[in-house]
Image (cartoon, rainbow, N blue to C red):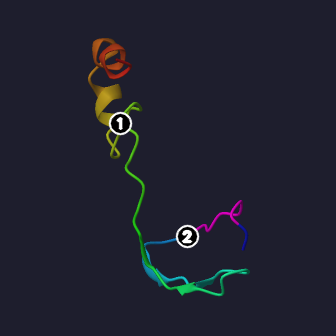
Amino acid sequence: MTAQEQLIAADEATVTLSVTGNVSARSVSPVIKVTAAPEDSDFLTTKNNLSEIADGGGEAQVESRW
């Protein structure tokens, strides 16, 4: 792994990454905790309530878009 590469995690975990310098031969083993990214709140999220919006009529459908 070079300085330009990325470590990508598929799930939350704790990982110990061992790194040794090419020139200095110094080693370090940091513990890295990977957590889930925060959800983006700029988008409308619904939890199976689309039928409730439809049942509410045209006004509810217009309100759900804002």
Residue annotated with mark 1: 41
- Badge 2: residue crowd in 10 Å (few <14, some 14–19, many ≥20): few
Q: Helix or strand or loop: what does disc 1 sit on?
A: loop
- Mark sitting earlier along the chain (1/2): 2
From the image, which quarter does the N terminus lie in? bottom right
In the foreground, 63 or 59: 63
Report the side of 59 relative to 8 (left or right): left
In the foreground, 37 or 23: 23
Residue visible at 59% across and 86% down?
Answer: 26
Picture coordinates of residue 57 (x, y %)?
30, 18
In the foreground, 27 or 47: 27
Picture coordinates of residue 65 (x, y %)?
38, 19
Please say if 41 is above or below 5.
above
Residue visible at 62% across and 68% down?
Answer: 7
Q: Amino acid at mark 2?
A: Ala
Report the side of 3 relative to 27 (left or right): right
Magenta-colored stretch includes residue 26: no
Please say if 14 is above or below 34.
below
Picture coordinates of residue 10 (x, y %)?
55, 70
Residue sticking out furthest to the front: 24
Magenta-colored stretch includes residue 4: yes
Q: Helix or strand or loop: what does disc 2 sit on?
A: loop
Residue annotated with mark 2: 10
Residue visible at 41% across and 61% down?
Answer: 36
Please say if the residues under marks 1 and 2 sit with CB atoms less than 8 Å apart: no
Magenta stretch in the rendered image: 3-8
